[in-house]
C-alpha cells in the first residue's frame, strides 16, 4: 500500500518505473533486470537497466510485441517480461528475474505491483496529455487574440492605404530609393519633389524647373532652417517649398521637399509628404550605415555566440548576414604583439581569413580578435597570411576543438584562449598556431590564464629538485622529465640524455633521496609526471631560468 501511494504521488513516468524496479524484491524472491517505457510508439530502456545483457534482453522484449513472455538472462533460470498495460495502450515492460520458484502468494504480489505500476503510468500519461492539450489551447487562444488585433488594425488603416496605394506601388516597383520617392511624390501631387542631404546638397529631383547649377548651400542658413523645421510637427513652409525632415530616431539624415510656388498644397499633399519622408528614412539610414551595420551585425552575432545565445535567434540572424551556422565551427583567437586589437587590426584579420578561404564571423576583445569560422583552419595558412599583412611574424593564434552545437561555442572560446596562452608561454617558439585538441595533458588543467596554482603545484612536487639543480648546476628535473617521456625505459632515457645507464640509475636514486618521493608509488609517480609536464610545457620559461 505504501508503494502504491508512492507510485501515484509522482507524475514522472521514469520515476514510476524506477520505484517499481527498486521495490520488486519486496514481492518475493525477485529482482528487476530491466525496465522499458513506451515513448512515441517505441520502447525506450530505463537508465537503471544493466549493461551486461542489455542487447539480448532488448531484442527479446521487442519480439514479444506487447505480450508477456520469458526472457533469457544468462545465469538466471527464471526471467520474464511483464507488460505494463493501461486501458488503451502498453505503457512499457518490467523484466523480472527470480532466484527461486515463487509461491502463489508471491506471484499474486508481483502481479499486484505490475497492475499498480501500470495504473500509475496511465495516470501520469493522462496528466501529461491534459497538460499538453491545455498548453495547445492556450497557444491557440493567444494566436486568435493576436489575429483579432491585427484584423482591427488592418481595418483602421484601410482608408489610408487606399489613398497612398499609387505612391507605394510605384516605390515598390522601382525598388525604393530616393529617386523612387521623388518620382512617386511628383506623380501624386504634380509638384516638383526633391531630396537634399542634411547639409543642403541636392541628392534627387523629379519635376520641372530644377535649378542648374543647384545653389551651393550656406551652412549657417541651412542649420537655422533645420532647427526651425525641427521645432514644428509635420511639413513646414519655407518660402516656396514645403519641407519635412528625414530623421529616424531623432537624427537628421536629410530633407524631403515639394516646390509649391502657387501654394496649391492641401491636406492630402501634406500627408503624402510625411509618408514619403517616413519611407525615405530607412533608405538614407541604409546608405549611410551599410558598411557599419554589416560589420556590427557580424560582431554582435559573434559576441552573442561567444557568451551564449538562443539557437533559433542565432540561426535566423546568421541567415540574415549570409553565414551558415548549421555547419561545424571552430573558434579562433588571434593576438599580434605589435598590434592593438582595434578596428583596423580586426579588418586586417578579416581580410587575411577571407584570403585563405575561411568563412567566419569576427569580433574583438581588449587584446585579441576572435573568429567563429565554419571549417578547421589550416595549421599555417592564416598565420602566414597575417604575417604578410602585418609585416611581422610576432603573432599567436589559438584554435579550439570543433563545435558540434551553438551551445559549445562559449566553452570552445575558452579552449582557443587556452591554446593561445600555451603557445605564448611555451619554452620553444612563442609564435604560430596552436590547436587545443593537440595540447595533450594541458587540456585537463582547467580554464584561466593565472599560472599561480600551476606554479604552486610544480613547487610542491619538484621544488626541492629545482632548488638542487640551481645550487649544484645539475639536471635532475630534466632527467625525471625525460624518464617519464620515455615511459620509464632506462635504455631509451639514458640514450636521449646521452648518459650511461648506471648514471641514470644514480640520478633516479638521488631524485628519490632529494624529493622524498617514491617513483614506484602510483600516486607519487602520477603527480611527479604531471608536475614535470607542467614544468616543461606551461612553466618552461620560468623553470628554465631557475635551472640555469
Image: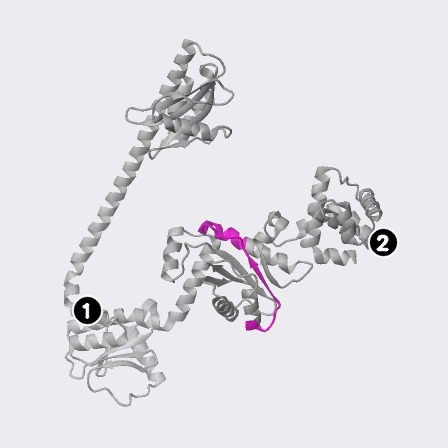
CA gap between label 1 and label 2 equals 90 Å
Q: Which residue is mark 1?
A: 169
Q: Relative to residue 515, is residue 440 drawn left or right?
A: left
Quarter of the image that includes the C terminus:
bottom right
The relative height of residue 372 versus residue 49 in the rendered view (above or below) is below
Sequence-first disc among 1 and 2 = 1
Asked which secondary structure carries label 2, the reply is helix
Q: Which portion, as a residue range, is magenta?
A: 388-414
Q: Nearer the viewer, residue 26 or 197?
A: 26
**Does the stretch in magenta take in 1?**
no
Q: Relative to residue 266, is residue 456 drawn left or right?
A: right
x and y, in percent, of residue 114 in the image: 38, 20
x and y, in percent, of residue 244 in the image: 26, 75
Q: Nearer the viewer, residue 500 or 270?
A: 500
x and y, in percent, of residue 372 in the image: 48, 59
Q: Relative to residue 153, is residue 117 drawn left or right?
A: right
Q: Which residue is mark 2?
A: 472
Asked which secondary structure carries label 1, the reply is helix
Amino acid at each position: 500500500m505504501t508503494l502504491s501511494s508512492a507510485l501515484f504521488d509522482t507524475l514522472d513516468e521514469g520515476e514510476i518505473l524506477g520505484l517499481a524496479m527498486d521495490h520488486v524484491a519486496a514481492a518475493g524472491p525477485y529482482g528487476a533486470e530491466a525496465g522499458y517505457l513506451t515513448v512515441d510508439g517505441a520502447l525506450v530502456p530505463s537508465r537503471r537497466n544493466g549493461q551486461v545483457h542489455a542487447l539480448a534482453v532488448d531484442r527479446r522484449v521487442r519480439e514479444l510485441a506487447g505480450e508477456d513472455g520469458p526472457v533469457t538472462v544468462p545465469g538466471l533460470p527464471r526471467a520474464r517480461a511483464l507488460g505494463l498495460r493501461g486501458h488503451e495502450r502498453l505503457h512499457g515492460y518490467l523484466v523480472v528475474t527470480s532466484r527461486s520458484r515463487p509461491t502463489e502468494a508471491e506471484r499474486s504480489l508481483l502481479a499486484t505491483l505490475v497492475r499498480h505500476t501500470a495504473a500509475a503510468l496511465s495516470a501520469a500519461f493522462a496528466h501529461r496529455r491534459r497538460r499538453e492539450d491545455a498548453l495547445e489551447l492556450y497557444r491557440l487562444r493567444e494566436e486568435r487574440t493576436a489575429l483579432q488585433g491585427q484584423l482591427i488594425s488592418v481595418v483602421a488603416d484601410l482608408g489610408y492605404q487606399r489613398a497612398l496605394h499609387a505612391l507605394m506601388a510605384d516605390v515598390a516597383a522601382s525598388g525604393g530609393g530616393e529617386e523612387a520617392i521623388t518620382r512617386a511624390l511628383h506623380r501624386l501631387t504634380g509638384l516638383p519633389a526633391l531630396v537634399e542631404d542634411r547639409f543642403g546638397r541636392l541628392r534627387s529631383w523629379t519635376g520641372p524647373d530644377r535649378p542648374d547649377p543647384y545653389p551651393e548651400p550656406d551652412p549657417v542658413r541651412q542649420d537655422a532652417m533645420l532647427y526651425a523645421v525641427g521645432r514644428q510637427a509635420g511639413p513646414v513652409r519655407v518660402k516656396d517649398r514645403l519641407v519635412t525632415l528625414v530623421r529616424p530616431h531623432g537624427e537628421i539624415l536629410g530633407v524631403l521637399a515639394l516646390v509649391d510656388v502657387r501654394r496649391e498644397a492641401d491636406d492630402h499633399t501634406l500627408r503624402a509628404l510625411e509618408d514619403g519622408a517616413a519611407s525615405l528614412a530607412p533608405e538614407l539610414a541604409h546608405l549611410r550605415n551599410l558598411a557599419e551595420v554589416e560589420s556590427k551585425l557580424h560582431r554582435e552575432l559573434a559576441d552573442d555566440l561567444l557568451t551564449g545565445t538562443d539557437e533559433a535567434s542565432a540561426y535566423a540572424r546568421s541567415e540574415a548576414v549570409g553565414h551558415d551556422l548549421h555547419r561545424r565551427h571552430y573558434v579562433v583567437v588571434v593576438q599580434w604583439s605589435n598590434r592593438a586589437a582595434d578596428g583596423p587590426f580586426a579588418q586586417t584579420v578579416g581580410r587575411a581569413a577571407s584570403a585563405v578561404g575561411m568563412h567566419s564571423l569576427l569580433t574583438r576583445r581588449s587584446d585579441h580578435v576572435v573568429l567563429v569560422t565554419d571549417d578547421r583552419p589550416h595549421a599555417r595558412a592564416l598565420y602566414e597570411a597575417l604575417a604578410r599583412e602585418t609585416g611581422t611574424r610576432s603573432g599567436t593564434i589559438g584554435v579550439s576543438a570543433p563545435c558540434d552545437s551553438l551551445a559549445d561555442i562559449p566553452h570552445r572560446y575558452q579552449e582557443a584562449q587556452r591554446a593561445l596562452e600555451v603557445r605564448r608561454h611555451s619554452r620553444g617558439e612563442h609564435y604560430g598556431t596552436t590547436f587545443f585538441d593537440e595540447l595533450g595533458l594541458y587540456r585537463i588543467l582547467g580554464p584561466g590564464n593565472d599560472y599561480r596554482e600551476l606554479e604552486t603545484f610544480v613547487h610542491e612536487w619538484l621544488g626541492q629538485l629545482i632548488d638542487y639543480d640551481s645550487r649544484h648546476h645539475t639536471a635532475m628535473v630534466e632527467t625525471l622529465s625525460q624518464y617519464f617521456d620515455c615511459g620509464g625505459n632506462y635504455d631509451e632515457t639514458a640514450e636521449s640524455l646521452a648518459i650511461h645507464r648506471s648514471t641514470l640509475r644514480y640520478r633516479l636514486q638521488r631524485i628519490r633521496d632529494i624529493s622524498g618521493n617514491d617513483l614506484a608509488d602510483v600516486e607519487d609517480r602520477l603527480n611527479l609526471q604531471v608536475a614535470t609536464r607542467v614544468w616543461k610545457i606551461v612553466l618552461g620559461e620560468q623553470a628554465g631560468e631557475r635551472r640555469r
